[in-house]
């Protein structure tokens, strides 16, 4: 197939399990198809590349109707951890990598990983807070320049 | 179904350039198939991946994805992309004469 889309740039703005995985799967899949792929982590999406937080990404259990769980139940202490654990277990059985492993693998495919400058400043973070695979902290302008002539996905 | 001539033999390829019948493939076709993918002379590591793709296909009915290749072929994900920059599983499958590997991850 002669792909018309040769480049995809994905903005990851959410720090939940279900906010991060789809972006990682789409980026990895794009590289597997031979497309160029870049991930731009902004706002809470930064947790996906945060050295101390990327191992502790949780599933949204409050305000997530797709989970078919009563809102009051989703807010009980420990429910988010239990549901996350359950989901991770299911994913592991399907050989879906954990978020830290997946991000590292995506970097190995040659995809770019970038943190949003404004969000980094907002949360008082620096390059040292992020995993080594991060290629840089860039501005929105840098991102658009990088994304030019390709498609942009926002998750 | 388009028919192509590879190494002097007529083979059936699908619209994406994958072999319809992996039995029509032979090792002599590899240099020509690799040239179609803009790969130069293949190294031993390319061959390792190509042979592994076929082996997995005949054992499991589908070729491995990049992640599976990285875990089981003995070639890391990073090196796989160095060997096949346009997508290791996809390009190696075309050269190995097997259908496109299924799987999202």
Image (tube, coloured by chain):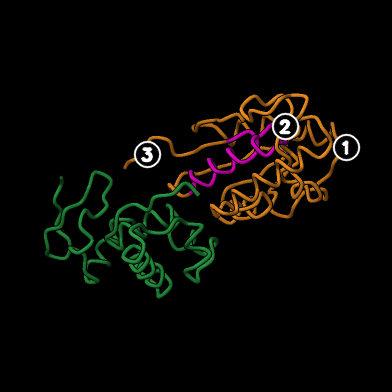
Chain colours: A orange, B green
Q: Nearer the viewer, residue A102 or A150?
A: A102
> Which type of secondary structure does the marked residue at label 2 adopt?
loop
For the record, the magenta segment spans A10-31
Determine whether the residue tagged by mark 1 lies in a helix, strand or loop: loop
Marked residue nearer the N-terminal end (1 or 3): 3
Chain at tag 3: A
How busy is the neighbourhood of tag 1: few (under 14 within 10 Å), some, or many (20 plus)? few
Of residues A117 and A19, the one drawn nearer to the viewer in this rendering = A19
* CA neighbours of label 2 inside 10 A, class few (<14), some (14 to 19), many (20+): many
* Residue placed furthest toward the right: A124
Give the image location of residue A6, x and y in percent: 44, 39
Do callouts 1 and 2 point to residues on the same chain?
yes
First along the sequence among labels 1 and 2 = 2
Chain ID of residue with mark 1: A
Image quarter of residue B15: top left
- State the mark number for residue A68: none
**Residue drawn at 24 percent across, 63 percent down:** B32
How far apart in space, not on screen, are marks 1 and 2 (Cα)? 27 Å
Q: On the rendered structure, is A42 left or right of B59?
A: right
Q: Residues within 10 Å of mark 3 (few under 14, many from 20)?
A: few
Up/down of B52 relative to A68, above or below? below
Q: Same chain for labels 1 and 3? Say yes or no.
A: yes
**Residue A119: image location, x then y, percent:** 78, 32
Q: Are marks 1 and 3 in contact (CB under 8 Å)?
A: no
Most prominent secondary structure in the magenta stretch? helix
In the image, residue B12 sits, relative to residue B27, either above or below, namely above
Relative vertical location of residue B45 with respect to residue A80 in this rendering, above or below: below
Check if residue A28 falls in the magenta segment.
yes
């Amino acid at each position: 197939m002669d792909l018309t889309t040769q480049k995809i740039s994905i903005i990851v703005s959410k720090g939940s399990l279900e906010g991060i995985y789809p972006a990682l799967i789409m980026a990895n899949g794009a590289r597997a198809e031979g497309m160029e792929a870049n991930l731009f982590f902004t706002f809470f999406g930064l947790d996906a590349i945060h050295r101390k937080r990327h191992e502790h990404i949780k599933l949204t259990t409050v305000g997530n109707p797709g989970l078919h769980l009563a809102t009051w139940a989703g807010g009980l202490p420990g429910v988010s951890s239990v549901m996350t654990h359950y989901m991770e277990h299911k994913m592991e059985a399907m050989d879906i990598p954990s978020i830290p492993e997946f991000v590292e693998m995506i970097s190995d495919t040659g995809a770019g990983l970038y943190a949003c400058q404004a969000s980094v400043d907002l949360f008082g973070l620096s390059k040292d807070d992020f995993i080594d695979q991060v290629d840089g902290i860039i501005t929105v302008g840098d991102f658009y320049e990088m994304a030019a002539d390709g498609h942009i996905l926002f998750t | 179904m388009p028919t192509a001539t590879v190494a002097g033999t007529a083979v059936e390829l699908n619209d994406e350039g994958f072999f319809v019948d992996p039995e029509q493939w032979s090792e002599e076709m590899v240099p020509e198939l690799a040239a179609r993918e803009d790969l130069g002379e293949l190294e031993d590591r390319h061959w390792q991946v190509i042979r592994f793709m076929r082996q997995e296909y005949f054992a499991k009915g589908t070729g491995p994805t990049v992640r599976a290749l990285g875990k089981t072929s003995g070639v890391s994900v990073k090196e796989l992309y160095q060997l096949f920059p346009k997508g290791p599983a996809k390009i190696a499958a075309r050269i190995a004469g097997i259908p496109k590997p299924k799987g999202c991850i």
